[in-house]
Amino acid sequence: MAQSLPQSYKAAVVVNKGQDLILKDLEMRPLIPEGLVAIQGLDGLGHQAVQFFSNMGYMIVALSHGESKRDFVLNLGAHDYIDTTKVDPVEKLREMGGADMICATAPDPKAISHLVSGLATGGKLLVLAAVGNIESTRSQ
């Protein structure tokens, strides 16, 4: 008789698959050392992305709604936190010179579409969430 995996194993598979996708993307399109990486979506995969990129030496900016996750992600290794209910994340990222990568882990195509304008010239968008169409009017 077949048994299904417990939820904890399913979550581990998703997290490990996300890490694998990040590594493959970085192999194909490396970032500059100490580049600015914005992490959108701060649940399980977003938490791992903060730790992963921070441990690799990148400057991490975490993006989320409200203040509830600020201290937690700063303790995980984020260097800055943007509360998107108070500050336009695109304007803040532009003030910082633009993100070399935006790693989107929350399935919000409208938010992701908006964030594209916060990329630096040559910046990369890595979407690790199942989303619909992502639109952008940004030109390079």
Image (spheres, rainbow, N blue to C red):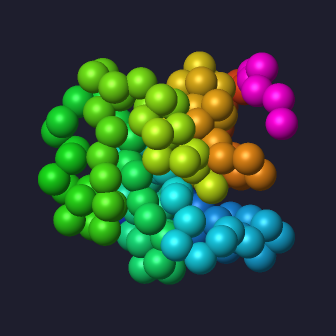
Residue at x-position 76% and y-position 27%:
138
Quadrant assignment for the C terminus: top right
Inspect this view and state whether residue 100 appears. yes
In this view, the residue in front, 138 or 55, is 138
- Which quadrant of the figure has residue 41? top left
Residue at x-position 54% and y-position 48%:
97
Q: Is residue 58 left or right of residue 122?
A: left
Decide: is 127 above or below 31: above
Residue at x-position 66% and y-position 47%:
120
Inspect this view and state whether residue 6 appears. no
Residue at x-position 82% and y-position 29%:
139
Q: Please tell me whether the stretch drawn in magenta is mainly helix, strand or loop.
A: loop
For the magenta stretch, what is the residue range?
135-140
Q: Is residue 124 left or right of residue 39?
A: right
Q: How many marks?
A: 0
User: Where residue 79 appears, x then y in whole percent?
Assistant: 32, 61
User: Where residue 85 appears, x then y in whole percent?
Assistant: 30, 22
